[in-house]
Image: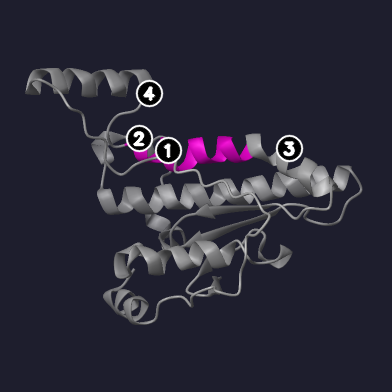
Amino acid sequence: MSLKQLYNDARNPPADPTHLSFKNKTVLYAALGAPRLILAVRSQEKGEAAKATIARETKCAPDNIHASVNVLSTALMALLLLPKLREAAATGVQPHLCFVNSQSSHLVKLDQVPTNQTMINDSSQFDSTTQYFLVKLAAWYAVRGIVERMRKDNAARNSINDNVIINVCCPAIFARSAEQGSRSLVSATGLGPESTGKLWANDKYLE
């Protein structure tokens, strides 16, 4: 994302969605990953041992935990929630599943895309910016895959409607306060079925 875009985002935050109400609705907010894990240990040696244990147990190196949390864990939770959301839809409720991602998913250049499926977890080729972009791209395609799966299942049931709204929002937190960024998440959950499979950023769809 360019400095010009960040400049514009900072001075043009999303509108405050005061028209929305979640009265009599159930809202589940799942923060699957924290940007930092702080370990309280008695020594540096014990801290390094704990770090190694976490990496071993999660089967993730420090540079690919980001992919596991932002892509795999999020997608798996969504797939587990989808049947329950469909049950709710059958009662006349309009369920909504909104993912938080980044516009960076749409900024990946062709030469940044790995020629195999291992680069994203390959520490020898690690570049923080490229890795971030690729993880966000992978998360975007995960959402698109979930939408496609839902629509195929709906077709098998002779239903032409998206009975669960599934979309993505980008808070653009680097150029805004947390409150301003949260407006994108709130407003995205107020969008209709036309938003399914789309990315909502700066009060508009990102093509």
> Quick check: 108 above or below 53?
below
Residue that numbered label 4 is attached to: 58
Mark 3 or mark 4, earlier in chain: 4
Q: Residue at x 13, y 18 (%)?
A: 46
Q: Could you classify mark 2 by the number of other residues whose Cα lies within 10 Å: few (under 14), some (14-19), or many (20 or more)?
A: some
Q: Could you classify mark 4 by the number of other residues whose Cα lies within 10 Å: few (under 14), some (14-19), or many (20 or more)?
A: few
- Position of the C terminus by quadrant: bottom right
> Whole-percent x and y of residue 167?
61, 58
- The residues tagged by marks 1 and 4 sit, at their Cα atoms, a distance apart of 11 Å
> Whole-percent x and y of residue 42?
10, 20
- The residues tagged by marks 1 and 3 sit, at their Cα atoms, a distance apart of 22 Å
Q: Which portion, as a residue range, is magenta?
A: 64-79
> Of the numbered discs in the image, which one, if any, rests on residue 3?
none
Mark 2 or mark 3, earlier in chain: 2
Q: Is residue 73 in the magenta section?
A: yes
- The residues tagged by marks 4 and 2 sit, at their Cα atoms, a distance apart of 8 Å
Query: Splitting the image into 4 quarters, where does residue 205 fall?
Result: bottom right
Q: Residue at x 59, y 50 (%)?
A: 27
Nearest the viewer among 17 and 192 is: 17
Mark 1 or mark 3, earlier in chain: 1
